[in-house]
Image (cartoon, rainbow, N blue to C red):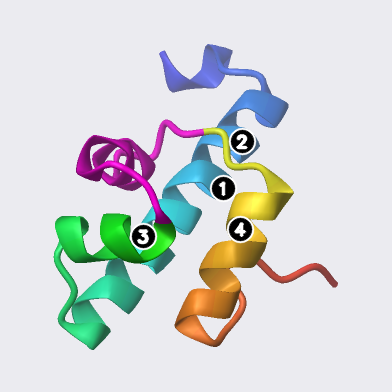
Amino acid sequence: MLGSIPPQVQNQVDLCFDISDKIYSLMVNRGLTKKQLADAMGRRPSEITKWLSGQHNFTVATLSKLSTFFGQPIVTVS
């Protein structure tokens, strides 16, 4: 079943989950709840839940804001 998934789709899914895992890890390291992160980012907690689901299509602006908030890159480009 997984063999029928186009590589670009698999790469996108993997990247989305890597981003959500990174955000979750940074939240845990800071002891933040979804509500606290939502308040800091000017968003609703339900949006943070979507971010952490691995199914959100982040904008560069949002990734930049998250990187600034956490003081480290969420995504790196080489």
Q: Which residue is mark 2?
A: 12
Q: Earlier in the sequence, mark 2 or mark 3?
A: 2
What separation in Å lies between label 2 and label 1 (alpha carbons)? 5 Å
Q: Nearer the viewer, mark 1 or mark 4?
A: 4
Give the image quarter of residue 30: bottom left
What separation in Å lies between label 3 and label 4 (alpha carbons)? 13 Å
Q: Are marks 3 and 4 in contact (CB under 8 Å)?
A: no
Residue drawn at (80%, 67%) of the image: 77
Q: Earlier in the sequence, mark 4 or mark 2?
A: 2
Residue drawn at (24%, 41%) of the image: 49
Q: Are marks 2 and 1 in contact (CB under 8 Å)?
A: yes
Tag 1: residue type?
A: Leu
User: Quick one: quadrant of the N terminus?
Assistant: top left
What separation in Å lies between label 1 and label 3 (alpha carbons)? 10 Å
Q: Which residue is mark 3?
A: 21
Tag 4: residue type?
A: Leu
Q: Earlier in the sequence, mark 1 or mark 4?
A: 1
In this view, which residue lies farthest toward the right? Answer: 78
Residue 15: mark in rendering: 1
What separation in Å lies between label 4 and label 2 (alpha carbons)? 16 Å
Q: Which residue is mark 4?
A: 63
Q: Could you tell whether 65 is left or right of 26 in the image?
A: right
Magenta region: 42-56
Tag 2: residue type?
A: Gln
